[in-house]
Image (cartoon, grey):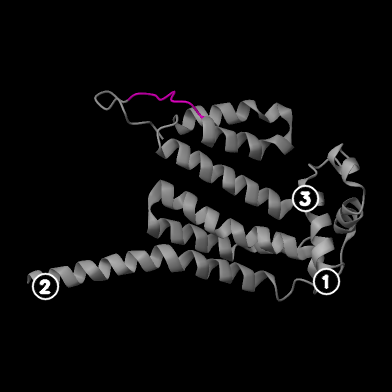
Amino acid sequence: TGAVCRLQRAKGIIAVMLLRRIAPFALCLLAFVLAVPLLDARSLWGDEAFSVWASKQPLDSLLLGLDAQPPLYHVALKLARMLWGESVFALRYISVICGVLLTPIVYRAARTLAGSTPAVLAALIMALSPILTYYQQEARMYAIAALMTGGAMWMTARGVARGFGSSAVCTSRYKSWKPAGRASEPIALAAQGTFCPREQRRIPGRPERAVA
């Protein structure tokens, strides 16, 4: 009986390890496979053409606010053009990378909040998301914005899990950044998760537990 219990326990440990290690990579591959085959099936449209034009401008012009959007995507697209060329596939490929990277970030955030099994489900939903696949196939800033926001959410989840303030405190502080503009929101939320101080609402009898 003891040997059977040990064997079952070993199988459970192996299953958990496989779930934690293999599932994120498999879901990244799924997101990649869904986005790449039709990446250059349609030509660039107006906003994408503007992104390409903006990426061809001098770096200092981009950093000083050539476009109403933040300069990060256009700088990244400038680098991508230098590395991969000017084809439609190459111009959109950076969005594919951002979309693929978002899948494991969603997995880690969900794992921090709810455990491995819900994390796999959340990452699967993200990998299969039609809207994410659509934006992975555009030479626009949406995929990189989603990646930054997902990373900020993960950092916030880690901060709450480690006791650096309740989610209510972090959320209220995040909202206070919104007048600064849409461009600052991912940075603001990342700062909340990293530096949110220990301003916890206490539960009677459980002084160390933060209210999520």
Asked whether residue 201 is drawn in magenta, I would say yes
Horizontal side of 181 relative to 53 (left or right) equals left
Image quadrant containing the N terminus: bottom left
205, above or below 78, in the image:
above
Residue 144 tag number = none
Label 2: which secondary element:
helix
Q: How would you classify the magenta stretch by its main secondary structure?
A: loop
Residue under label 1, please give it.
Answer: 42
Q: Determine crowd level at label 3: few under 14, some 14-19, many 20+ residues with C-alpha closer than 10 A.
A: many
Which amino acid does the dot numbered 3 rest on?
Answer: Tyr
Residue drawn at x 47%, y 37% as measured from the top left: 159
Residue 73 tag number = 3
Asked whether residue 76 is drawn in magenta, I would say no
Q: Are marks 3 and 2 in contact (CB under 8 Å)?
A: no
Horizontal side of 82 relative to 170 (left or right) equals right
Residue lying at the far left in this picture: please name it: 1
Residue under label 2, please give it.
Answer: 3
Using the rendered image of the protein, determine whether residue 131 is visible from the camera's viewpoint: no
Report, in whole angstroms, how far the alpha carbon at label 3 lies from the one at label 2.
Answer: 57 Å
Which amino acid does the dot numbered 1 rest on?
Answer: Arg
Q: What stretch is highlighted in magenta?
A: 196-202
- In the rendering, at what x and y percent does residue 192 appear? 55, 33
Q: Is 108 or 60 nearer to us in this picture?
A: 60
- In the rendering, at what x and y percent does residue 143 appear? 70, 55
Q: State which tag comes first along the sequence, 2 or 1.
A: 2
